[in-house]
């Protein structure tokens, strides 16, 4: 395998531009995810001018906003952040499912990577644990996935062009 060419992304932001698409619903959780994402992007070389935060009302609304952001071609990747916490009704299933499938569809249709950092937890405690500052913060993880996907797609495009 030493002689097989490998194409992969890296975690260097360079001149990449990112939209952090954040739901306002459950903002006490989402704000921590945003902090984790911004911190990760900055630690990997992004300047403030390379990051924009766009707020949607809730997770269900995120796919439409993500489509507009992706279609603008202004961003190399989108970091989608939200928190859907299960309650006593089936509402959770509809919101979480539509959010996830909608964001995946937008990414596939536009070719713009959308990192899924929308928490779908059974309890508020689980959501808090996944949004605490530190290496386990899911906003941080989503931001790093966005960087890697954006750099990977650039590498793939270069390979195809050769």
Image (tube, helix red, strand yellow):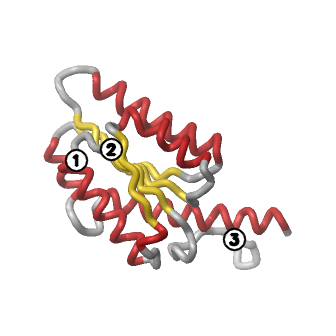
Residue at position x 33%, y 26% in the image: 93
Front-lying residue, 78 or 101: 78
- Residues at marks 2 and 1 touching, judged by CB atoms closer than 8 Å: yes
Q: CA distance from mark 2 to mark 3?
A: 36 Å
Relative side of 89 to 157, left or right = left
For marks 2 and 3, the one nearer the N-term is 3
Q: Residue furthest left?
A: 125
Rendered location of residue 125, percent (x, y): 14, 47
Circle 2 SS class:
strand
- Between marks 3 and 1 in the image, the one whose residue lies nearer the viewer: 1
Q: Which numbered dot is residue 27? A: 1
Relative side of 12 to 93, left or right = right
The residue carrying mark 3 is: 6
Q: Residue furthest top?
A: 89
Circle 3 SS class:
loop
The residue carrying mark 2 is: 23
């Amino acid at each position: 395998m030493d002689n097989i060419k490998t194409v992969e992304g890296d975690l260097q932001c360079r001149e990449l531009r990112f939209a952090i698409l954040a739901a306002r619903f459950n903002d006490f959780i989402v704000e921590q995810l945003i902090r984790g994402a911004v911190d990760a992007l900055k630690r990997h070389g992004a300047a403030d001018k390379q990051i924009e935060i766009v707020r949607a009302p809730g997770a269900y609304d995120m796919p439409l906003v993500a489509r507009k952001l992706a279609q603008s071609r202004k961003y190399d990747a989108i970091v989608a952040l939200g928190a859907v916490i299960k309650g006593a009704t089936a509402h959770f299933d509809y919101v979480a499912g539509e959010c996830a499938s909608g964001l995946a569809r937008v990414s596939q249709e536009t070719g713009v990577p959308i990192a899924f950092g929308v928490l779908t937890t059974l309890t508020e405690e689980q959501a808090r644990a996944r949004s605490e500052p530190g290496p386990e913060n899911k906003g941080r993880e989503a931001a790093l996935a966005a960087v890697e996907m954006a750099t990977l797609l650039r590498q793939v495009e270069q390979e195809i062009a050769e």
